[in-house]
Image: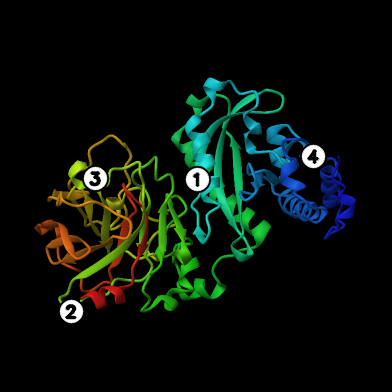
Amino acid sequence: PEMKLAQVQCCSKSASQLAIVRALAMVELTAENYHNFIKDSPEMRQKMMQQIQYVTSKLAPLPFSVCVSDPLLEDTPIIGASKSFLALSGRDFREIIGKNCRLLLQGVPAEEISRSARKDSRNYCTTARLRNLASLPNMVLLQRNARKSGELFYNYIMLGALRGPGGRILVAGLQIDMGDKVEKITVADQAAAVDAHQENMRLVQKAVFGEMGPSSDSSAAYPGMAPAALPWADRAGVFEGAKELPLVAWPRSRAVMRNRGVTVLRRDGGELPRGATTMSLLPCKVHKDGSVSCAIRVEAVSPRWCTEIAEGAFLPFFGFTTQTPKDLDPDGLPEQIEFTGRSMCAGGKGEVFARAHDGNFKRKDPFANIPDSEIAKTKGTVAEDHAICVGDVMECIWRDGVVEIEVGGRSVMKVQDELIGKVPKERPVHALFDCAFAVCQATLLGWSVMDEEE
């Protein structure tokens, strides 16, 4: 059967939109995509077709390659694409609507397909189905793809979550043809592609759902604040005195934000041990003894990583910085928590790091040793008679020259060293947290909760 879009009213009679409708009207309901659009009623089919027509009409004019998929439908089918995507893939609307993006793998030799990229993209779409999702950072992938003609090329892909009304999430995939020789792709080429993708992702969001971000008032109230922090800025006052507080994450992080931004989930928590670094939107409260602290509640642990300290488990990393969300550029927090400028961090197997310099440390060679002049370090011990469990309340306390991590009020790590330094009095201190190792999901607790325990 054919989808008769003549029954669907168009919101515009422009020639370009009518051309899209005519193309979509020829989409055949094959066995592969039948369940995605028919469901059990003509009404559901009409709603699906309305969604396809709307999304495609918004994407078609964009001057770059993008397709949008619905993660809530089985097999995450494409529901819209730009004309540039059709040109990149060598296909028409009939051949892409209702199909999964892996259609770009047709004709690629099995040994040239990146399994890790495929797995990462599947995990991303699975994460996009989570309820109470506050934000999902963008992901970049390099995959060998093929056009319909069989011509092979390397595709530099960025996946991003488009936020719509009522928490609606669609997944956008941006593509850039990087040529047919992977050895010719330089670091500079990849950096330029990421920059282009970041800007284009904002254009896709605006085209499909509008800005759906902070109000214009927040930009005026927080001039210079990094864009990733602005969505929470409007609501900062709501959390004063709350039992749970918002964390801020940036698009290139592995931190997935849930529950209004108070809960962080590490994307790919079963594969990667670190990289979900977040910052508290509100500054820490200074306690009566002059110390500052932050506490999290463990919401989930990953079976991939050990939870028994005696058997080699690592603590997640906590930290403090005198940088604020406003200070950070669009790149946000660094890849590792200890690279944060003006910071002190602790965790793992008793490690403590301190960086006195302004600005985040940027490592050019991932295998080179980091000089102490950039990041000073020392080490203590962790109590081995402890296991990391769901429901644990873990608190990191910074006193002058001392950092301590407690679990349920019991000290499991305490280090005293001059490199830890004194708690700053002249600047506000923001908490840092890397949802790392066994802890794959955690909620930042409010300062008022710690006051009650105190």
CA gap, disc 1 to disc 4?
31 Å
Task: Using the image as rendered, state which of residue 303 and residue 157 is in the foreground.
Answer: 303
- Left or right: 404, with 32 as reference point: left
Of marks 2 and 3, the one in the foreground:
3
Question: CB under 8 Å between callouts 1 and 3?
Answer: no
Percent across and percent down for residue 157 are: 56, 40
Question: CB under 8 Å between callouts 2 and 4?
Answer: no
Q: Which mark is residue 288?
A: 2
Number of numbered labels in the structure image: 4
User: Considering only vertical position in the picture, is 139 above or below 240?
Assistant: above
Q: Quadrant of residue 159?
A: top right
- Label 4: state its secondary structure: loop
The residue to which callout 4 is attached is 29
Percent across and percent down for residue 73 are: 65, 48
Percent across and percent down for residue 84 are: 70, 41
- Left or right: 406, with 323 as reference point: left
Question: CB under 8 Å between callouts 2 and 1?
Answer: no
Question: How many C-alpha atoms fall within 10 Å of the one at disc 3: few (<14), some, or many (≥20)?
Answer: many
Residue at 73 percent of width and 39 percent of height: 33
CA gap, disc 2 to disc 4?
68 Å
The residue to which callout 1 is attached is 139
